[in-house]
Amino acid sequence: MFNPLIRTLVKVMVASLIVGTILSHFGITAEQLIMEFGLSYERVADMARRGVSWAAPNLLVGAMVILPVWLLLYLFRPPGGSSQKQD
C-alpha cells in the first residue's frame, strides 16, 4: 500500500536534488527565487504558520469522525476476507 507512495516520494526527492544541484551550479539560490516572486522568508514562514493553524483543527475534527468509523468497519468486516491480493 505504501510502496508506490514511498517510491513516488523518493523520485520527487531525487529530482529535486538534481534540479537544485543544477540551479546552484548556475548561481541561483532559494533566496533569489523567493525575492523574484516578491516574497520574503518572513512572509513564507507566516503563510506556512497560517496554513498549519488552519489545517490542524480541521484534521483533528475529521479524525474524530473518520477513525471511529474506520475502527467499526475494521472490527465488523467478515472474517477471512482480505481486500489485498496475495501473489
Image (spheres, rainbow, N blue to C red):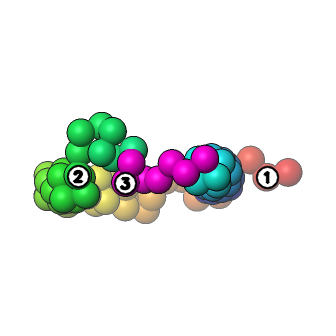
Q: Earlier in the sequence, mark 3 or mark 1?
A: 3
Element type where label 3 sits in the image = helix
Left or right position of 51 against 79: left
- Residue at 33% x, 46% y: name it: 34
Could you tell me if the residues under marks 3 and 1 are in contact, i.e. CB atoms within 8 Å? no
Determine if residue 82 is in view: no
Of the residues tagged 1 and 2, which is closer to the observer? 2
Label disc, if present, on residue 40 of the rendered structure: 2
Instruction: Please rate how many residues cluster around mark 3, counting C-alpha atoms within 10 Å: few if below 14, some from 14 to 19, many from 20.
Output: few
Viewer-proximal residue among 40 and 48: 40
Instruction: Please rate how many residues cluster around mark 2, counting C-alpha atoms within 10 Å: few if below 14, some from 14 to 19, many from 20.
Output: some
Element type where label 2 sits in the image = loop
Q: Earlier in the sequence, mark 1 or mark 2?
A: 2
Which residue in the protein does label 3 denote? 31
Which residue in the protein does label 1 denote? 86
Label disc, if present, on residue 11 of the rendered structure: none
> Residue 20 placed where, x, y %?
59, 52
Could you tell me if the residues under marks 2 and 3 are in contact, i.e. CB atoms within 8 Å? no
Q: Is residue 32 above or below residue 76?
A: above
Instruction: Measure how far apart labels 1 and 2 are at the Cα level.
Output: 51 Å
Residue type at mark 2? Ser
Viewer-proximal residue among 78 and 40: 40
Left or right position of 37 against 27: left
Q: Earlier in the sequence, mark 2 or mark 3?
A: 3
Left or right position of 3 against 51: right
Instruction: Please rate how many residues cluster around mark 1, counting C-alpha atoms within 10 Å: few if below 14, some from 14 to 19, many from 20.
Output: few
Viewer-proximal residue among 44 and 23: 23
Viewer-proximal residue among 75 and 7: 7
- Residue at 39% x, 48% y: name it: 32
Residue type at mark 1? Gln
Of the residues tagged 3 and 1, which is closer to the observer? 3
